Amino acid sequence: MSERLGAGAAVVGRVAAGSAARDAHAPSVGELLDETPTGAFHRRAVVVSGVGFFTDAYDLFVISIVATIVTAQWHLGRSETSWVNGSAILAAFVGAMVFGRLADVLGRKRVYAIVAMLMIVGAISSACAPGFWWLVGSRAVLGLGIGGDYPVSAVLMSEYSNRHDRGRLVGLVFSMQALGLVVGPIVAIALLASGVGHGLAWRILLAAGALPAAAVVYLRTRMPESPRFTAQVRGDTARAAADLVAFSAGAIAVPTAATATHRSLRPRRLLLDRHLLAIVVGTAGSWFVFDYAYYGNTLSLPAILAEVDPHATLLAKLAWTLGMFLVFAVPGYAFAVWRMDRIGHRRLQLAGFAILAAAFAALGAFHGLTTAVGPFLAVFGLTYFFVEFGPNTTTFVLPSELFPTELRATGHGIASGLGKLGAFVGVFLVPQLETHIGLRGMLLVAGGAAGVGLLLTLLLPEPAGLGLDEVYPGPPLVSAARRRGRAPGGHDVEHLGASGRSNWRPDAVGAPEAVGAPTEVGALP
């Protein structure tokens, strides 16, 4: 790696020695990344980020199986069971907010290593828990790492992506959640079917989460800092270009513009800028209501299935859960990755929320759908398809591309953190609603939450097809080449004009309409 970095630095040095005229027309690091076709280094970034997200998903969802076992073993009440299920999620709310901000200050790579170590410690400590409070505390440590991994994984992948395939690439990272959903029940079924006692099985399930987390620590040491962050936030274009040349193994070796300045947007801009505030409300609000319904229902699924069929064994309920994930959820992830850049990220989220609202309303309205296993699994499973081919994927992707580089991890941390807060509310509220208003009433509330998510999504712009520096509708963060109205390749850039703001249309897919010459970011209050 050091040899590659040296070669990259030499390339940058030769570029810096060139004429000023050629440098003036050279593309920026961001523009190179936006236009470079998807290649091996993109896939490498997907693997590095995706392994971490697989760990997040496995650790979050395997707890529903563990909670079922320890509730019987330790004679826990409903509230205590909810804490076993929800402690990691509540801590993830804090972790996302804290580590998201730190990733914009310290850098994405440094925070990446910290959160992976927290996940290892939390997983091992959870497996060794002698009692209820130890388990809850250990899961909270794990949750801090999981929460921090959400914004860093999404943002790092988004910042390496090109504009044509950004949704697909970030979606591929998120689709590793499908493996986490499936592997947990598979391991549990294998352990229980092989005769391993319940008391040992749940400890093995929790300890297994440390293995992929350890792989994450190693893989992330092999990945350089985000070149966009290095160039646009730290102002070190030479280092960014060298890292990019090295990590892409020469796939990107085009001279870059050397006119970089250190930029800083304070977090208060998220509240003072009306466009950024709308993005915060739209991303965080829609993620909150979605995770309320999704995690509340998924982590309560064993109890929900027990109400549909009170005589089903734990092994049978695990098999039904695995079947729904394989038949509905996994294809949903695949369709999202395949089609979201063509459909539009915002549009897919709108369609997904609409279908979820209708499906939950049908389950709540028709008595026969919640009293027979077959019909219930069919309709409830259908919601899993449109959860993945819809807001479960897009709520992860959209915050990674709608905020400017200086606040991208902070914004994603706020959105994912509030999403996890919604999940925590769902973990506690869904069982209570099921007790007081019944399964059908609880499903009607979930349908209402999906309707609210649809309305909040209307606040967001459509980023599909745009470069990351073109998405933010405030003062455009673009290079000198674009400010003069010419793209790096000499093509006219008609969407840059004289007003300093974009003609921001939430329903547009692709480049925005005429906007103005950018103002200096440093001049922002």
Image (spheres, rainbow, N blue to C red):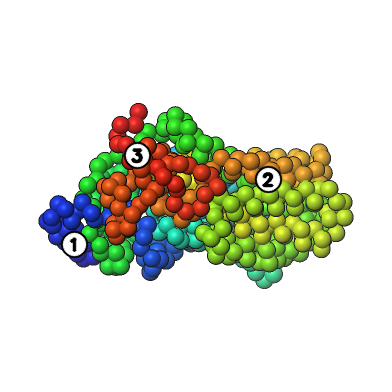
Q: Which residue is mark 1?
A: 11
Upstream in sequence: badge 3 or badge 2:
2
Q: Does dot 1 land on a helix, a strand or a loop?
A: helix
Within 10 Å of disc 2 (Cα), the crowding (few <14, some 14-19, many 20+) is many
Within 10 Å of disc 3 (Cα), the crowding (few <14, some 14-19, many 20+) is few
Identity of the residue drawn at 68% across and 63% down: 328
Q: Quadrant of the N terminus?
A: bottom left
Identity of the residue drawn at 59% across and 64% down: 335
**Residue 350: image location, x then y, percent:** 62, 49
Q: Does dot 3 land on a helix, a strand or a loop?
A: loop
- Residue 507 against residue 65 in the figure, above or below: above
Cα distance, mark 3 to mark 1?
A: 35 Å
Residue reaching furthest to the bottom: 194
Q: Type of residue at label 2?
A: Ala
Cα distance, mark 3 to mark 2?
A: 40 Å
Q: Which residue is mark 2?
A: 450
The quarter of the displayed image where residue 140 is located: top right
Q: Quadrant of the C terminus?
A: top left
Q: Is residue 191 visible?
A: no
For the residues carrying marks 3 and 2, which lies nearer the camera in this image?
3
Identity of the residue drawn at 55% across and 65% down: 338
Within 10 Å of disc 1 (Cα), the crowding (few <14, some 14-19, many 20+) is some
For the residues carrying marks 3 and 1, which lies nearer the camera in this image?
3
Upstream in sequence: badge 3 or badge 1:
1
**Residue 466: image location, x then y, percent:** 43, 53
Q: Does dot 2 land on a helix, a strand or a loop?
A: helix
| Relative side of 358 to 30, left or right | right
Q: Nearer the viewer, residue 405 or 505?
A: 505
Q: Which residue is mark 3?
A: 498
Cα distance, mark 2 to mark 1?
A: 51 Å
Q: Nearer the viewer, residue 189 or 401?
A: 401
Identity of the residue drawn at 76% across and 64% down: 316
